[in-house]
Amino acid sequence: QQQVKQSPQSLIVQKGGISIINCAYENTAFDYFPWYQQFPGKGPALLIAIRPDVSEKKEGRFTISFNKSAKQFSLHIMDSQPGDSATYFCAASDLYGQNFVFGPGTRLSVLP
Amino acid sequence: DSGVTQTPKHLITATGQRVTLRCSPRSGDLSVYWYQQSLDQGLQFLIQYYNGEERAKGNILERFSAQQFPDLHSELNLSSLELGDSALYFCASSLLGLGVKETQYFGPGTRLLVL
């Protein structure tokens, strides 16, 4: 129940295209859903996060869509750029933020 | 640069040995988190400290231990090392210790290779 599933494992997108990464969870106690971006040789960095009381959150070219009934959430990267090439992790945590788990990651490559 | 420093950058050791990884949080941050990242296990949260006290525990093995000192730097001790402990170990820090509900600033990591 603690697991967060993430797909696809890897994704190749042309410059200007839309990148979509999906995550699914089982634990209904999860209350907060952040996404992290990690470039090679660097630590992860928080990208965007959503709470289950909203269905969508947008920050620039990055949008999280959240479907509470399906227990799924996804990251959309609009107008994908080569600089977006990185590994993306979804995560889920409980109300207090201390009990959290990461998805296995998606390696995104944006071709110029 | 996140402001979080980790030493050493690389560490090569043998099975059965013990190593200590060190982390200095961003100036002003009170909480430190340790993570392990490996190809087969992905990114795993190990343990969190807030102002010197343990606040949360993740998938940390009994062979591993950590502490946070009065100056807020933290050390992760890994003992009886096994081949499977080879991984990248990240430290992160945050101000309020709210887990992932607060921006955590990650250090550059320590790459551990157990031979």
Image: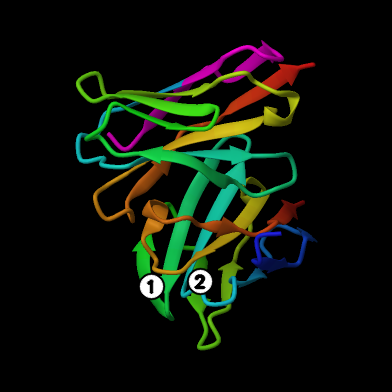
Report the number of discs.
Answer: 2
Amino acid type of disc 2? Answer: Ala
| Relative to B80, B103 lies left or right | left
Task: Tell me, yes or no, if residue A34 can be seen here.
Answer: no
Q: Position of residue B98 (x, y in %)?
A: 36, 61
Query: Mark 2 falls on what kind of element?
Result: strand
Is B86 inside the magenta-drawn segment?
no
Look at the image and give the residue range highlighted in magenta: A1-21
Which of these two is toward me, B93 or A103?
B93
The residue at which mark 1 appears reads as: B54
Query: Mark 1 falls on what kind of element?
Result: strand
Q: Residue furthest bottom?
A: B70
Indicate which disc, 2 or 1, sits on the residue closer to the N terminus.
1
Image point (49%, 47%), residue name:
B44
User: For residue A16, what is the image quadrant?
Assistant: top right
Tell which subunit mark 1 falls on: B
